[in-house]
Image (tube, helix red, strand yellow):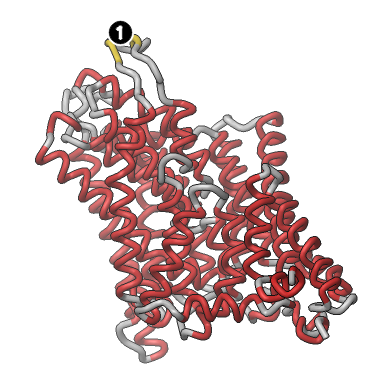
Amino acid sequence: MLEGFLVANFVPLMFVGLLVFLLSGIPVAFALIGTGLTFGVLGMELGLFSPSLFSALSYRIYGIVQNETLLAVPFFTLMGLLLERSRMAEDLLEVVGHVFGPIRGGFAVAVVLVGAMLAATTGVIAAAVISMGLISLPIMLRYGYNRPIAAGVIAASGTLAQIVPPSLVLIVLADQLGRSVGDMYAGAMLPSVILIGLFLVFIAFVAVIRPHWVPAIPVSARIHREPSGSSGHASLLVLLILALLVGLGWAHFHDRIVERLIGREGIAATDEVVIISLMVATVFAYLLACVDLWLRLNWLSRLAKQVTFVMIPPIVLIFLVLGTIFLGIATPTEGGAMGAVGAFVMGVARRRLNLPLLTQAVDSTARLTVFVLFILIGATVFSFAFNAADGHEWVEALFKQLPGGQTGFLIAVCALVFVLGMFIDAFEIAFIVIPVLTPVAVSMEVDLLWFGVIIGMTLQTSFLTPPFGLALSYLRSVAPKTDGVDRKSGLDVKGVSTAQIYAGCIPFIALQILATAFVIYDPSFVLGPVNSGKAAPVAVDADTLMPPSMDTLMPPMSDLSN
């Protein structure tokens, strides 16, 4: 009787077993390995599997280790850690906060914009949340920001690293879904912009209905004061206009040259021209600021020069990495390598990177890379027993019973990932859940790029969910818990309670759910930029970018189970 029960409920019992291992406190990688081996042996004893079930396991592990796509993970991680240790976040918050500080809600806007830039360079949520919590939260509390709003803005902006390319999770999702990392990055760009826009609209809304919650930073607190007494914003605006005109002029020149040589019109709207035009505009602004500084012409305000020298190097790095990937010049792995070298050069040029900091960054990179690989190996061991028991068919039958077709399936998946994200890491979810759900998505004709971006956005939402959201824990670790006196201004500053951090994240969770709903409702937000050619996929043969399919290295699982 017991044997019949075990055979009939083998797949759901595997999930229960995995849950028991996870709740026991065992690291996820070893919980997956333990579950897979335990149920693999049990299946052999019950006669469900062949004794040779795990004979091809070594081939699978070898395939994981030689996967060139996953090489992008250590490169992008190293890039982010080098930039974080060169105190780029501090410089960006200082200068962007000064630009937007004179308006209500301006410093909150600066936090969102800096969070987006950190996401596009560092790609590490912990570094982004902790850096902005240490730097911006004291300033916001010092000048009277509503504490829940301040905490929510910082935590939500830090989680942008989850979905804004070059997100590490997007690399893992692309690998698990068998899709190009370049396409995954291109598909995530517009949803990222939508989400950032929703954050900014919410801050503007708060500034209108509750202006005392997000006050302007007083003049006395602004660092870059002009000798003339002006704010310096007019000079900055002129510099931006000139740079954009130069970029547009280059685009027009490029268009005319191509038209004469090839006879093609309308080329100025292609991704190549847009990206290179922005690069031309950026380089022009930087050179103009350098000339003004070297020759002491004082054409530009101090603010304009500070914005140029602080913001343009990371912007150039973003173009260097993402631009080359989108244009097909480099693979994601090569782009990550260039980004790591660029981050190293930036740190050395600013004289903020020494051997101990470099050693710490390399050590942390190695730890994260090993963490990812061990989880992937554990998920592979788990999948052996799961696939041999036809677990994918059980999951497919379960989800196909849901009403609503594709939409119902996607909503159910989002709910599942949302809940799991409260308890386990995004990488762990990607390696456990995605292989199980991908066959169901394929059978329901869900585009896997669309599916991957939706999963990524839902994982980002889970980082803010009380009480286990990781972004909340990071912010709690640096936010003041009790009232005190600000050392810089001498003003009384109230502490931030855990309940206030939770309350501040609720509206941003709602905004992230709204953005995810937009993407579910209209797949063109993801697929449009890829399919229309506005963001071309990486021009690399998939067979050279991805390792051979594991199925080619071993017999089908169904054969092993007979």
Q: Is residue 560 visible?
A: yes
Residue at (23, 29) in percent of width and height: 146
Q: Where residue 196 sits in the image (x, y, percent)?
A: 32, 53
Amino acid at circle 1: Gly
- Asked whether, in this view, residue 262 is left or right of residue 108, the answer is right
Q: For this rendering, which residue is in front, 38 or 173?
A: 38
Residue at (23, 32) in percent of width and height: 101
Q: For this rendering, which residue is in front, 113 or 324?
A: 113
Q: Quadrant of the N terminus?
A: bottom right
Q: Quadrant of the C terminus?
A: bottom right
Q: Residues within 10 Å of mark 1 (few under 14, many from 20)?
A: few
Q: Where residue 343 sits in the image (x, y, percent)?
A: 58, 45
Q: Is residue 43 placed above or below 112 in the rendered structure?
A: below
Q: Is residue 496 placed above or below 527 in the rendered structure?
A: above
Residue at (29, 53) in percent of width and height: 511
Q: Is residue 270 visible?
A: no
The tally of labels here is 1
Residue at (65, 49) in percent of width and height: 22
Q: Where residue 333 sits in the image (x, y, percent)?
A: 64, 63
Check the image and name the residue furthest to the front. 1
Residue that mark 1 sits on: 490
